[in-house]
């Protein structure tokens, strides 16, 4: 399966590269989808221009647990939902051991970082160069604000609610 995925990725990205289409890579956890995720993906695609090809890398469950918390939604379901989002052309699960592995395979022209992602852009560019990637790194500024504009806020809201147990009988 992994070998097949590598072949598919190589074939897809090479066909776009030959057509001079900008490949933009966006990454994230995308746990409980909210408007901020949509904004990040829309803005990421815009960075590449009118004909940009947006490839999204969804963090693995093990990565989320080590960096944030236990994910509410498992990685396969998060990937499935991301693939359904309008700006997304392709989506893959990231590596469990090396965050640069998929970058080396896809060879994006641009990598976008969300406004809530805490990366040192200069350090990330340096690491990419060491891995042989000339991808530009762009921080997406701004955020789609709303009452429930983060996974954490959604979780806190649900935890604070009182439910009649009868509503769960058909779940």
Image (spheres, rainbow, N blue to C red):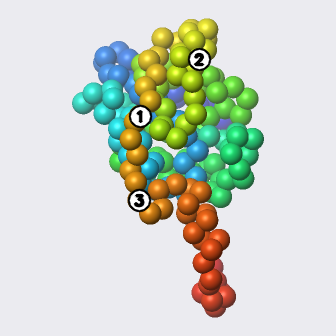
* Separation of marks 2 and 1 at Cα, in angstroms: 17 Å
Closer to the camera in the image, 141 or 53: 141
Residue 63 lies, in percent from the top left, at 70, 39
**Above or below, comparing residue 113 to residue 147 in the picture:** above
Residue 7 visible within the image:
no
Secondary structure type for disc 2: helix
Closer to the camera in the image, 153 or 22: 153
Q: Is residue 50 left or right of residue 37?
A: left
Closer to the camera in the image, 118 or 111: 118
**Disc nearer the start of the sequence (2/3):** 2
Residue 132 lies, in percent from the top left, at 56, 8
The image quadrant that residue 109 belongs to is top left
The image quadrant that residue 104 belongs to is top right
Q: For mark 2, what is the residue?
A: 123
Secondary structure type for disc 3: loop
In the rendering, which numbered label is found on residue 140?
A: 1
**Above or below, comparing residue 63 to residue 106 in the picture:** below
* Separation of marks 2 and 3 at Cα, in angstroms: 32 Å
Residue 61 lies, in percent from the top left, at 69, 46
- Residue shown at 63%/89% (left/top)? 164
In the rendering, which numbered label is found on residue 146?
A: 3
Mark 2 vs 1: CB contact within 8 A:
no
In which quadrant of the rendered image does the N terminus lie?
top right
Local crowd size for mark 2, using a 10 Å CA cut-off: few (<14), some (14–19), many (≥20) = few
């Amino acid at each position: 399966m992994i070998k097949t995925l590598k072949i598919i990725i190589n074939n897809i990205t090479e066909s776009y590269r030959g057509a001079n289409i900008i490949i933009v890579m966006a990454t994230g956890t995308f746990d409980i989808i909210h408007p901020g995720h949509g904004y990040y993906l829309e803005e990421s695609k815009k960075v590449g221009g009118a004909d940009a090809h947006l490839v999204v890398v969804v963090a693995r469950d093990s990565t989320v647990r080590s960096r944030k918390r236990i994910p509410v939604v498992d990685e396969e379901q998060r990937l499935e939902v991301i693939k359904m989002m309008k700006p997304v052309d392709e989506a893959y699960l990231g590596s469990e051991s090396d965050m640069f592995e998929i970058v080396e395979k896809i060879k994006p022209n641009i990598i976008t970082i969300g406004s809530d992602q805490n990366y040192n852009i200069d350090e990330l560019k340096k690491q990419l160069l060491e891995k042989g990637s000339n991808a530009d790194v762009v921080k997406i500024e701004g955020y789609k604000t709303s009452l429930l504009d983060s996974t954490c806020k959604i979780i806190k809201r649900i935890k604070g609610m009182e439910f009649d147990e009868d509503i769960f009988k058909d779940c």
